Image: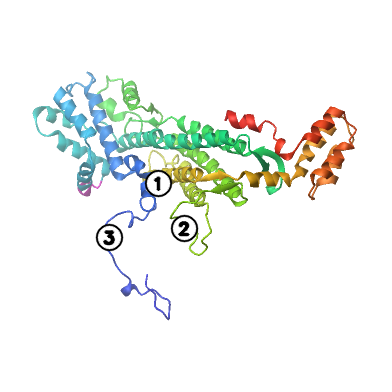
Amino acid sequence: MVYDAHTFRPCIDRAPQLTMDLSPLTAISPVDGRYGEKCDDLRNFFSEYALIRYRTLVEVRWLQHLAADPGIEELPALSPVLKDHLNRIVDEFGVEDARHIKRIERTTNHDVKAVEYFLRERLGNDPEAVKVREFIHFACTSEDINNLAYALMLAHARDRVLIPAMNQLVTVLRNQAHQHADLPMLSRTHGQSASPTTLGKEVANFAHRLARQRRALAAVTPLGKINGAVGNFNAHLIAYPDVAWSEFAQRFVESLGLEINFYTTQIEPHDWIAEYCDALARFNTVCIDLCRDVWSYISVGYFRQRAVDGEVGSSTMPHKVNPIDFENAEGNLGVANALLQHFAGKLPLSRWQRDLTDSTVLRNIGVALGHSLISVRAMLKGLEKLEADRERLAADLDDSWEVLAEAVQTVMRRYAIPEPYEKLKSLTRGRAVDEKTLRRFIEDLDIPDDARRALLELTPAGYIGLARRLAREA
């Protein structure tokens, strides 16, 4: 926008008006622009082309399923030639096919009907094709096709792109947990020095949490329906009253790798998609926690970041190596979860038997998955650059002998020393305690010699409980 230098009002007549082809530089969404390469894998599942391709797949498979049932008397069994022709339409479906369907849609002003007309064209006019053509989209409402298309899109994107990326993240975290299992680290509950842990154990916590949320996402069952305009098989039954349509539909939906939902209106109610979005959002929330913790550990020097030749940390401060991968991931995770939470709250809501508010919302679901995938890949990039600063970790522990107050007062409790907590509180709370001060306190305790000796041998670096084992078992 160009502004007048005196009034600061927009000078519309001087603003450049450009006509631009769509590219990563001209895309409005960063998912298709700046970060396009990071989520290319999702284009096969959530682009407009992909939606049209999945609709075409469902229409073809429904036609083939109808033709395989002898109860549909007027639809003859498909010849091997016609079967192969239909399979090629699906297997060789390309961007130009999708463009042609979009051209048909300009006339129909209906996207699913355009797919039906495309298939009628592709079948041709030979005698067998003419008999088959009217059974394309037989007894279907558009939502019979759409719900199955979206179910396949979400299931395939999850299983082929998201879950493998999540697996990679969990594997990297587990490897780092094992690598740093023995490396003591000062804990910081409420940001203050606390009982020590190991760096590996803290990484293991995230590996375990993310693996659990990944399993929850993988366990969500995609549902589908193909039961007509209001979910009762009305048209199916009036045309072929002797066909067991419930079982027929179930076999078809299961042949696609989905589970049948018989209790629907015109739309499959999307409850399972809400479960999917909630599960992915929980995975993302754990990732946000990971990003913030790693960012903080970098800030206090527990992690160093390997500098990458050619990268610039700051446009004015040459020394900077910023934790940009974790910041980028955290920002994208926030965008993803805002969308996922909207989807989970909105999609199960529909007025009476159908309203159209879910349609445009569903078209955005790939955007949320895109931001999620961008985030996982940013975290993987950031984790690859991390190196533990052993000297800094050791120095913090050596300066924090007060954290052994928990150990000392717990042993005092065992041996019935009066007011152990209060005595340690008086000695340590709000003040730095060095090794000598703590040892003098221990030497004066009326406890068995072996217990006193164990406490005197204890150091902050050695007070890590089962952290080593837990880190290795992650």
Q: Nearer the viewer, mark 2 or mark 3?
A: 2
Specify whether residue 357 is in view: no
| Residue 190 as seen in the image, left or right of residue 447 | left
Q: Looking at the image, is mark 3 or mark 1 earlier in the sequence?
A: 3
Residue 163, image quadrant:
top left
Q: Bounds of the magenta span?
A: 105-109
Q: Quadrant of the C terminus?
A: top right
Q: Which of the labelled discs sits on residue 312, or is there none?
A: 2
Residue picked out by circle 3: 20
Against 202, residue 241 (above or below) is above
Local SS, label 2 = loop
Q: Amino acid at mark 2?
A: Val
Q: Front-most of 288 and 425? A: 425
> In terms of sequence position, does the residue under pointer 2 or pointer 3 come before the other?
3
Q: Nearer the viewer, residue 293 or 334?
A: 293
Which residue appears at 32% of the width and 40% of the height?
44
Please say whether residue 440 is visible from this viewpoint.
yes
